[in-house]
């Protein structure tokens, strides 16, 4: 698998960090993980094959993760690159996905589902296992962030394991499901003294990392308070033992092999 960071930032406008979105290329297809408002144009900027995207994963409905979905469907409807496509696009997300996107569609008769190819909306619960792509198995875990928010764990056809917490507060459960992941993409919203419990600060991140025994850790969802801070050094200073051989600060455009 190969990961491209489309957006390492948050909802807060930032000169270098777009809103959350990640492109995961597997041997059997392409997955977009979260669709921040900047995602459609960021995919084009990274020269990714967005007209042939197979699957979208929506972790929760905060607009920094979901706000680009309706505009992306609108662009797929009209883009010259998609007019001959027939293969469906599958969109997986928590319960409420269908009613929310339908409400946006109905609000102005956008007809977002009248595309040259079918769109399949699939709602998934926590603690379920499903095929997100043929042979790629996904597992969901409830996270303490919003009532619907889910973390995702993927096992590729070649047995590589990828984890994406998206936004979350601290929970032992994340560490449990992320056991032995090859790459764990984890939010690291705050440096310390986090103002709310529904996000992580660096100390929480390192606790999860230690318990998960992830090989590589990619820190994302970075608020502007991280600007000019050496995040990786601070993370290593909090590290106990030999967990995570690699800790990486996400930047937009970063590409990683898993
Ligand atoms: Zn967010
Ligand atoms: Zn959120």
Image: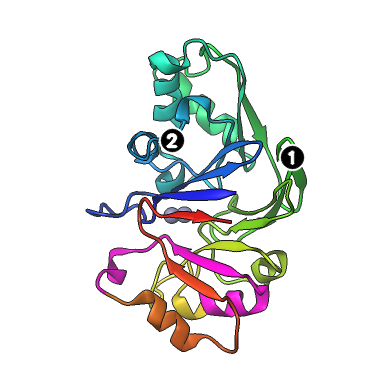
> Residue 249 placed where, x, y %?
41, 67
Nearest the viewer among 81 and 198 is 81
- Residue segment shown in magenta: 205-228
Within 8 Å: ligand 1 and the Cβ of disc 2? no
Tell me residue 198's x, y (percent). Answer: 50, 65
Q: Position of residue 96 (x, y in %)?
A: 60, 38
Q: Nearer the viewer, residue 60 or 216?
A: 216
The image shows residue 207 at horizontal and vertical percentages of 58, 80
Ligand 1 quarter of the rendering: bottom left
Which class describes the residues within 10 Å of circle 2: few (<14), some (14-19), or many (20+)? Answer: some
- Secondary element under disc 2, as helix, strand or loop, is loop
Cα–Cα span, label 1 and label 2? 23 Å
Q: Is residue 234 above or below residue 124?
A: below
Badge 2 is on which residue?
48
Is 17 placed left or right of 147 in the picture?
left
Observer able to see residue 192: no
- According to the image, label 1 marks what residue? 131
């Amino acid at each position: 698998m190969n990961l491209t960071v489309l957006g390492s930032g948050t909802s807060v406008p930032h000169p270098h960090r777009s809103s959350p979105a990640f492109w995961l290329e597997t041997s059997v297809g392409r997955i977009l993980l979260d669709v921040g408002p900047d995602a459609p144009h960021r995919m084009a900027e990274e020269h990714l094959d967005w007209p042939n995207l197979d699957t979208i994963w929506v972790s929760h409905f905060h607009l920094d993760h979901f706000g680009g979905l309706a505009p992306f469907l609108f662009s797929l409807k009209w883009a010259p690159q998609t007019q001959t496509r027939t293969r469906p696009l599958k969109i997986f997300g928590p319960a409420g996905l269908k009613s929310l996107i339908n409400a946006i569609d109905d609000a102005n008769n956008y007809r977002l589902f009248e595309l040259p190819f079918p769109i399949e909306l699939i709602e998934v619960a926590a603690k379920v296992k499903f095929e997100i792509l043929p042979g790629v198995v996904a597992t969901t875990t409830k996270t303490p962030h919003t009532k619907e928010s889910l973390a995702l764990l993927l096992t590729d056809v070649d047995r590589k394991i990828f984890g994406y917490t998206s936004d979350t507060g601290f929970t032992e459960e994340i560490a449990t499901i992320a056991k032995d992941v090859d790459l764990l993409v984890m939010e690291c919203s705050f440096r310390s003294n986090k103002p709310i419990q529904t996000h992580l600060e660096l100390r929480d991140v390192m606790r999860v990392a230690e318990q998960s025994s992830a090989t590589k850790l990619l820190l994302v969802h970075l608020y502007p308070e991280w600007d000019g801070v050496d995040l990786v050094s601070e993370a290593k200073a909090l590290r106990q033992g030999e967990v995570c051989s690699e800790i990486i600060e996400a930047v937009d455009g970063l590409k990683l092999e898993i």
